[in-house]
Amino acid sequence: MISLIKSSFYQEQETKKKLAEFILSASFLSMGEQCRQFEEKFAAKQQRKFAVYVSSGSMANLVLVQTLRNLGIITSGDRVGFSALTWPTNVMPLIQLGLTPVPIDCCLETLNISPETLEKELKNLDALFLTNVLGFSDDIVRIQEMCDQKGVVLIEDNCESLGSKVNGTHLGNFGLASTFSFFVGHHLSTIEGGMICTDDEELETMLQIVRAHGWDRHLTKQKQLKIRVKHNVNSTFYSRYTFYDLGYNLRTTEINGFIGNAQMKYIDEIINKRKNNFLRIAASIYKNTSMYYPIKYDHIDLISNFAVPVICRSQKIRNELVEKCKDKIEIRPIVGGDMVLQPFFKKYVNNFVGENKNAKIVHEQGLYFGNNPELTEEEIDKIIKIFTT
């Protein structure tokens, strides 16, 4: 069986040994210096000014949306577009925080929102939470321009696309902020963990406040002084227990931070292997257009994904593939499928009328298999054979 996930993180045995030594010698395991170093390294790699480390990619989405609410960038009832083909915890924070979620269909060729699918809803949007699905994107440069022209706040869920580049720019760097996931099996694993990246300092400050109870403990001394003066908090006794805005406890630990730092030295190798795996597999599988819908990726400078999607021409073909893969290749539906077909969406967004034609096809006729940096040549050959014969 070719598993979706082969290990907890890259170079697992070496990393586990170093982790064990760290735990035995560390005197402090709640969020601290290891996490701060990981934030700095990740921000530099992503080419963003700031990175804020949280407990998961899903919680990164929640923290980001709460931060935008706290700052008044979006307000109760605002209409926020989101990729209909996505993971549930991309849209759940919109519902949880009193916003109006607006599903936007994907383009079958790219699995992503396109300028054409966005155009239909853009005039009625206050913000767009764009998911860069499985390392792909559509014309994100044009989407960014459209949002700028209409004053629509653009943020990106980049949990599935760490390393991908379009027009010389990392996916995740087109919007005001972006989220990342370090769950096992994703591009870079800290077992659990997530990150929010931005160039906006005010946003970064509020992200840190939201991450930890609404207090200021993880801010710099200068920022602590500023917020305490603003709120007339001049007592050391009370300052550590003053809560400035709505927040959660979504911190991670020094254990996760240490793993992140250990994995950062492999990140280029990980991304390069995933890219090469994908290009080799896609060149064989995607040319079979009688069985599969074509997927367009020649506009992407560097494509980095942790799973390879296949959209079958019919449910019959998809079902036959499921049987062919049984006990040979681990497969899954494509991310969370079409969100409007999910029970939670039907329960809480009962005023949605219509359908997402393309996302529905992906939901009903798609699947993906793992693309991890530990795939062997024999395993890649086996995947290609099963999906092309």
Image: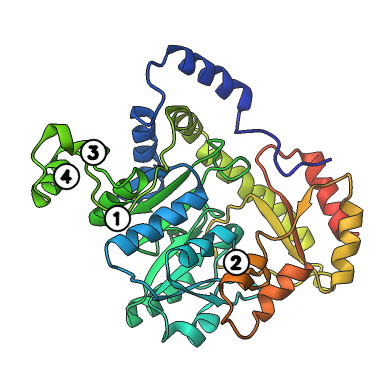
Residue picked out by circle 2: 298
Return the disc, 3 or 2, that comes first in the chain's sequence: 3
Q: Check the picture and name the quadrant holding the C terminus.
A: bottom right
Residue picked out by circle 3: 241
Given the image, on which type of amino acid does mark 2 rest? Asp
Secondary element at image label 4: helix
Q: Which of marks 3 and 4 is in front?
A: 3
Image height of 146 relative to 93, above or below: below
Return the disc, 4 or 1, that comes first in the chain's sequence: 1
Q: Nearer the viewer, mark 4 or mark 1?
A: 4
Residue at the image position 59 percent from the left and 45 percent from the top: 186
Return the disc, 3 or 4, that comes first in the chain's sequence: 4
Residue picked out by circle 4: 223
User: What x and y, as percent, mark residue 44?
Assistant: 36, 44
Q: Residues within 10 Å of mark 4 (few under 14, many from 20)?
A: some
Q: Give the CA distance from mark 3 to mark 2.
A: 53 Å
Seen from the viewer's position, the closer of residues 298 and 89 is 89
* Mark 3 and mark 2 residues within 8 Å of each other at the beta carbon: no
Q: How crowded is mark 2: few (under 14 residues within 10 Å), some or many (20 or more)?
A: few
To which quarter of the image does residue 237 belong? top left
Given the image, on which type of amino acid does mark 4 rest? Lys
User: What x and y, as percent, mark residue 210?
Assistant: 33, 50
Secondary element at image label 2: loop
Return the disc, 2 or 1, that comes first in the chain's sequence: 1
Secondary element at image label 1: loop
User: What x and y, as percent, mark residue 208?
Assistant: 31, 46
Q: How crowded is mark 1: few (under 14 residues within 10 Å), some or many (20 or more)?
A: some
Given the image, on which type of amino acid does mark 1 rest? Asp
Q: Nearer the viewer, mark 2 or mark 1?
A: 1
Q: How crowded is mark 3: few (under 14 residues within 10 Å), some or many (20 or more)?
A: few
Count of number-bearing discs: 4
Residue picked out by circle 1: 199
